């Protein structure tokens, strides 16, 4: 057998990686593989019921989906304080059956720039992240709803 020198037919490692890539693409392309097809719509429906404070304006929304993971996020701009924003969502989520999990400080390069409050409902997790240091930030706060296959809410 001749040694492989990176020219001509693929090396055994390249064939293995191509097979792995094919399997991953099939997992993403096949409906129902890894994520219940109704789950993203269930999250969208819940997310739409999270009305922001009166003076908040949506800047951007994102939907992220991969095998066994779905996330919806919205960024907002407002002059409201983080305390007011956090109280608004705490009340709203509690009324919708969510349970408070924790508040964690958010740091960028060792500088405290806000807090992230987390909530659970079944196997879903919600977060409300607010910037106390708003200089140069394109958004004031964001909210997310996430379905991870293994989360603090599923324990």
Image (cartoon, grey):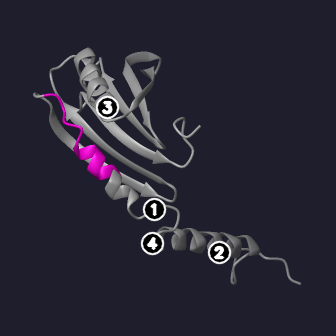
Of tags 1 and 2, the one toward the viewer is 1
| Location of mark 3 (residue) | 93
In the figure, residue 37 lies in which quadrant? bottom left
User: Does residue 35 sit above or below 152 in this rendering?
Assistant: below
Mark 2 and mark 3 in contact (Cβ < 8 Å)? no
Instruction: Identify the residue position indicated by label 4 in the image.
Output: 31
Q: Are marks 1 and 4 in contact (CB under 8 Å)?
A: no
Considering the numbered disc 3 on the image, is that residue within a helix, a strand or a loop?
A: helix
- Boundaries of the magenta span: 43-53
Asked whether residue 26 is drawn in magenta, I would say no
Earlier in the chain: of badge 4 and badge 2, it is 2
Nearer to the camera, 44 or 10:
44
Q: Earlier in the sequence, mark 3 or mark 4?
A: 4
Q: Secondary structure at mark 4?
A: loop
The answer to which of 67 and 91 lies nearer the viewer is 91
* Farthest-out residue, right: 1
Viewer-closest of 97 and 6:
97
**Disc 4 residue crowd, few under 14, some 14–19, many 20+, Cα 10 Å:** few
Q: Is residue 52 left or right of residue 47?
A: left
> Alpha carbon of mark 1 to alpha carbon of mark 2: how far?
25 Å
How many C-alpha atoms fall within 10 Å of the one at disc 2: few (<14), some, or many (≥20)?
few
Where, quadrant-wise, is the N terminus in this rendering? bottom right
Q: Which of the labelled discs sits on residue 19, or is there none?
A: 2
- Magenta includes 44? yes
């Amino acid at each position: 057998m001749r040694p492989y020198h990176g020219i001509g037919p693929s090396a055994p490692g390249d064939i293995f990686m191509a097979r792995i890539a094919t399997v991953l693409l099939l997992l993403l392309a096949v409906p129902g593989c890894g994520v219940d097809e109704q789950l993203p719509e269930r999250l969208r429906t819940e997310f739409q019921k999270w009305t922001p404070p009166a003076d908040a304006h949506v800047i951007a929304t994102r939907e992220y989906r991969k095998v066994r993971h779905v996330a919806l996020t919205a960024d907002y701009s407002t002059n409201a304080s983080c305390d007011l924003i956090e109280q608004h969502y705490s009340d709203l989520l509690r009324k919708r059956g969510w349970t408070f999990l924790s508040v964690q400080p958010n740091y960028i390069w060792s500088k405290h720039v806000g807090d992230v409050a987390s909530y659970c409902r079944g196997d879903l997790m919600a977060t409300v992240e607010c910037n106390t240091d708003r200089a140069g930030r394109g958004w004031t706060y964001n909210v997310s709803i996430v379905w991870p296959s293994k989360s603090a809410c599923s324990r």
